[in-house]
Amino acid sequence: MVLSKRGGGAAMGPKPLPVPAPVLPSPYRPVDASWDSEEDAPGPRCGHTLTAVAATGNPDSSDYVGPRLILFGGATAIEDGSSALGGGIRLAGVTNAVHVYDVLSRKWKRYSPVGEPPSPRAAHTATAVGTMVVIQGGIGPAGHSTDDLYVLDLNHSKFKWHRVVVQGPGPGPRYGHVMDLIAQRYLVTVSGNDGKRTLSDAWALDTSQKPYRWQRLEPEGDMPSARMYATASARADGMLLLCGGRDSSGLPQSDAYGLLKHRDGRWEWTLAPGVSPSPRYQHAAVFVDARLHVSGGALRGGRMVEGLPAISVLDTAAGFWVDRNGVVSSPRTNKSHTEFDSSLDLLKRCRHAAASVGNQIYIYGGLRGEILLDDLLGSEDTASRRGTEVNYYTLEQSHKSGFSNRETMVNSSPDVNSPSVPINDNKGLETLEKASAAEAEAVIAHFKAAKAAAEMDMEGEERPKEEKESDHEESENNVASGSNLASDLDDPVKSDVRLHHRAVVVAKEPVGSLGSLVRQLSLDQFENEGRRMSPWNLDQAHAAKRLLTKQKSPVALHKKVIASLLKPRNWRPPVNRGFFLDSYEVGELCYTAEQIFMHEPTILQLKAPVKIFGDLHGQFGDLMRLFDEYGFPSTAGDITYIDYLFLGDYVDRGQHSLETITLLLALKIEYPDHVHLIRGNHEAADINALFGFRLECIERMGDRDGIWAWTRFNQLFNWLPLSALIERKIICMHGGIGRSINFLEQIESLQRPISMDAGSIVLMDLLWSDPTENDSVEGLRPNARGPGLVTFGPDRVLDFCKKNKLQLIIRAHECVMDGFERFAQGHLITLFSATNYCGTANNAGALLVLGRDLVVVPKLIHPLPPPIRSPESSPEHYLEETWMQELNIQRPPTPTRGRPQPAHDRNSLAFI
């Protein structure tokens, strides 16, 4: 686990910083294939297809057939006098031969299937449908091939060709296009060239319905430009990823787009995240799990892609490209520095073909200059194979290998003197330094009430007096002097969970040439990591506890909410601050979500990959920005391959708590197994009655409906799970472990529904406790939030992780300047997703992406500069900001951690 920058004590001295190794396939090497006769050898070729067909039968039975690669078509020669360096080649020796490579025996064999074969062709497409290979399009000696579908049936001892009858119009003759099978049902073909122009259309054929018909698609979303010689590969969950290609002017493309079919029948294009290492066309690409492996390709003028970009991977689960030098933050050049790698030189080719069998990747043939290639290359996706075993370099090694280029990162770092987002806002600092005595008073009042209630409940129990006194003495000693750990804590917690050495950051500038620019910065550049805010917002008054009538939610209600609010790129606040749901609909939505929460455990059991969010506090615009920049939970987004986990504090402070909580509940109903919500300290009636949510409900829904809706939301909050355990290695919670939580079983024993007035110390610690100031402050200390609350040191974190066989704690609850902050040698991360908290903190917001390899990647957004507004030009924003200003006056936010309190301020939290 990485070392926290905040550590300063001798017991936690500096150690080499582990850095994740680039997660690339193993180097490509020639495969030692054989054949019985020269006729069985495939020979040199380009413009062919290589299609993987899965094994059939039981491995123990006589009819078992292992996985195979089907090589079809292509050009086997180049006409004399032609030049591949002139931007094109003249094909010769175009064939329709079929060669099969048996993966288990490593042997090639040529087959002559019965039936009517397709004409000789190259630049065609092929894909597997079960144990059949479908061929379409291409170009041959007689010109364009027809758009007929040919099926090579591999079920029989003698392979057989079938020509598929398709009714109605279709995509027409074309070459340089792409095709794959989506969701094991739809044949989809995209782009290409019909001999007259480069195309951008998309067609689909439903293989489950006869008679077969092509349907021209009209997808929504970000449409890719017209292109040819691109690649497309379908992910297992049904997403078709279109990558690269050459546009109508001959310019190679570097972008990638995902095409997905919604459940309601709509198709949608989505621009893939990340920065591609290089534009390219006539390359090859194939998925292994959620990772698209891209190899080779051509550039304008007939040049080849070579060097680092020759082998790259788009990790669609993590949202970035990687090559031999790590995460790609800007396009590489062919002269990018790297140590010599023979596998990179092998991939200097174009017009080749690729296929995958399990986590094995195969490449055959292609063109290098004017030389046709006949080699079969193999590689292994080690990230898929190794599971959670993650190799890593030390920081020193990574610098030697160029994995972390210091000079490049310094040049790409944000301008800390940017006038648009001032770092040192004196006015905001003064506001923060006023400390919020009201919040502290609320904490005190609430905790006293909870403690009194707990003591009353304890009177009837038969707990021995000596045990109570012992616990009390132990607690006091721990707070006074810090808990002493056993000697076995001298050994560091062994970890295969890694925090990535770079964070993904969206540029501050909202418009212009730098708008939406995404960069990767070294974690060492986050100078604000030690500056933490402590947003403690506690409760006081009890809401009316009348039971609300439970009625089952109509199926369409949560979809209505998603359709109205899930607009990452174009959501705008309502003009009149009104809310689009009435109290009856709020009750229906809460009831449906509540039924799901009731059947979930107190500690959720999750699998990676997971995208994790910290406090949102009603800042719905920031949630939309994070969704827009880094993917959103929709079948058009990334919900099919990554889960979403939210760590609480959905309401209060911000202007749009209603939008935030209703959208998250609707997403939970739509994707109950993939969207996860746990409870924060503001998901309590006594708290959100004071810090904005109750007021927002009343002002936006009216007195009667507003109180009713606020009460119903808080009934739901009592059912929320309290923590989440990911891969049995990472525990996620809102607050911390405090003084009382030593084992996960203590959290599991909490019975829901549970409210804060239950007086549970475990619940108070779970939702309210914080880490100490830095790694040098060990043990337990009084928490400035109020009496009875504590902060816990790095020794408590390491002890807890060791006892529970954990490697990382991810928690929220405190505003930190960079959106995330490390503690306890990196074994605890604080996460905060709302930017410029309360309009004064000027902090960044962040989320964490936990990949399948358990590498944690922080992804950040900066606060937007305040727009110039007036009551006349923007009345809705003026009303919102006035509302927030009044709330901040009544309940001031707490100061940023790392900024000392004025010594003379006796009302500051340091003196409470």
Image (cartoon, rainbow, N blue to C red):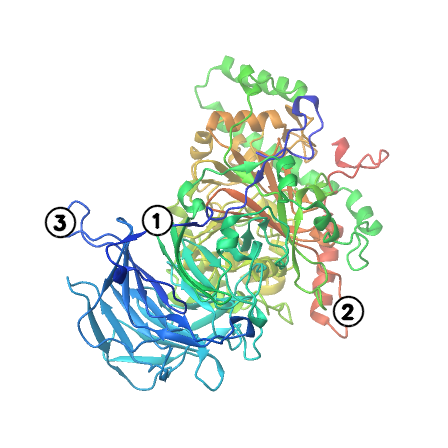
Kind of residue sitting beneath label 2: Arg
The structure residue drawn at horizontal position 48% and vertical position 25%, both measured from the top left corner, is: 803
Quadrant assignment, res 184: bottom left
Instruction: Calculate the distance from the C-alpha at mark 3 to the C-alpha at mark 1.
Output: 26 Å
User: Where residue 2 sits: x, y (%)?
Assistant: 60, 35
Outermost residue to the left: 62
Where is the C terminus found, in terms of image quarters?
A: top right
Which residue is the site of mark 1?
32
Q: Earlier in the sequence, mark 3 or mark 1?
A: 1
Question: Which of 696 and 811 lies nearest the eye of the viewer?
Answer: 811
Q: Residues within 10 Å of mark 2 (few under 14, many from 20)?
A: few
Question: Which of 154 and 7 lies nearest the eye of the viewer?
Answer: 154
The structure residue drawn at horizontal position 46% and vertical position 71%, both measured from the top left corner, is: 268
User: Where residue 224 sits: x, y (%)?
Assistant: 52, 73
Which residue is the site of mark 3?
62
Judge left or right: residue 458 versus residue 234. Answer: right
Kind of residue sitting beneath label 3: Ser
Q: Earlier in the sequence, mark 1 or mark 2?
A: 1
Q: Earlier in the sequence, mark 3 or mark 2?
A: 3
Quadrant assignment, res 364: bottom left
Outermost residue to the top: 466
Disc 3, SS = loop
Image: 259 above or below 26: below
Q: Is residue 445 visible?
A: no
Q: Which marked residue is nearer to the observer: mark 3 or mark 1?
A: 1
Which residue is the site of mark 2?
869
Tell me the tag on residue 419: none
Disc 2, SS = loop
Judge left or right: residue 801 versus residue 169. Answer: right
